[in-house]
Amino acid sequence: MDLGAFSVSLAVKDLAASRAFYEKLGFQVFGGDPAHNYLMLRNGSHVIGLFQGMFEQNILTFNPGWNQAAENLDAFTDVRELQKALKAEGIEIHNEADETTTGPASFAIIDPDGNPILIDQHV
């Protein structure tokens, strides 16, 4: 099952302080919007998102349709197909993607230890 690009979405208390910290680790901002309290940072192929005040826990994030550089892929498994496959495996889906639509959509699952996983397709 190809879930697409991977990143960790971090729930941060102070966006500027977190940005400064991760920049010291070699990460550079490549996206996001500080006015809306989020930034995307990259160090090589490693991607993290910093999100202030948007959610309570860190989230594992997968982006079908993107490579690790957040570039669109020509071929990928659509988020709705991934959702169907996980449902067939007996995994409970939270915030389901509307399976009658196309294009951008997302859904979430929770692992056995309570860690949220977001499958978030932007294309």
Image (cartoon, rainbow, N blue to C red):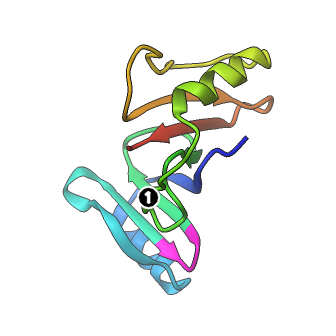
Expressed as whole percent of the image width and height from the top left, the position of residue 87 reads: 70, 16
- Judge whether 27 appears above or below 71 on screen: below
Q: Nearer the viewer, residue 36 or 65?
A: 65
Helix, strand or loop at mark 1: strand
Query: What's drawn in magenta, residue-wise?
Result: 42-46
Q: Residue 75, position in %: x, y? A: 53, 49
Left or right of residue 56, residue 15 in this image: left
Quarter of the C terminus within the rendering: top left
Q: Quadrant of residue 100?
A: top left
Asked if residue 39 shows in the view, the reply is yes
- At 49% from the left and 73% from the top, the residue drawn is 42
**Relative to the observer, which residue lies in front, 116 or 73?**
73
Q: Is 122 colored magenta in this rendering?
A: no
Residue at 25%, 59% in the rendered image:
33
Q: Mostly what secondary structure, the magenta segment? A: strand
The image shows residue 121 at horizontal and vertical percentages of 45, 40
Where is residue 101, by image quadrant?
A: top left
Residue 43 falls within the magenta-colored stretch: yes
Above or below — where is 24 with respect to 93? below
Please name the amino acid that badge 1 sits on: Leu
Residue lying at the far left of the rendered structure: 35
**Which residue in the structure is indicated by mark 1?**
50
Q: Is residue 59 visible?
A: no
Q: Is residue 50 left or right of residue 16?
A: right
Seen at 56% across and 41% down, the residue is 57
Query: Measuring 23% from the left and 51% from the top, which residue is drawn there?
Result: 36
Few, some or many C-alpha atoms within 10 Å of disc 1 (few <14, some 14-19, many ≥20)? Answer: many
Query: The N terminus lies in which quarter of the figure?
Result: top right
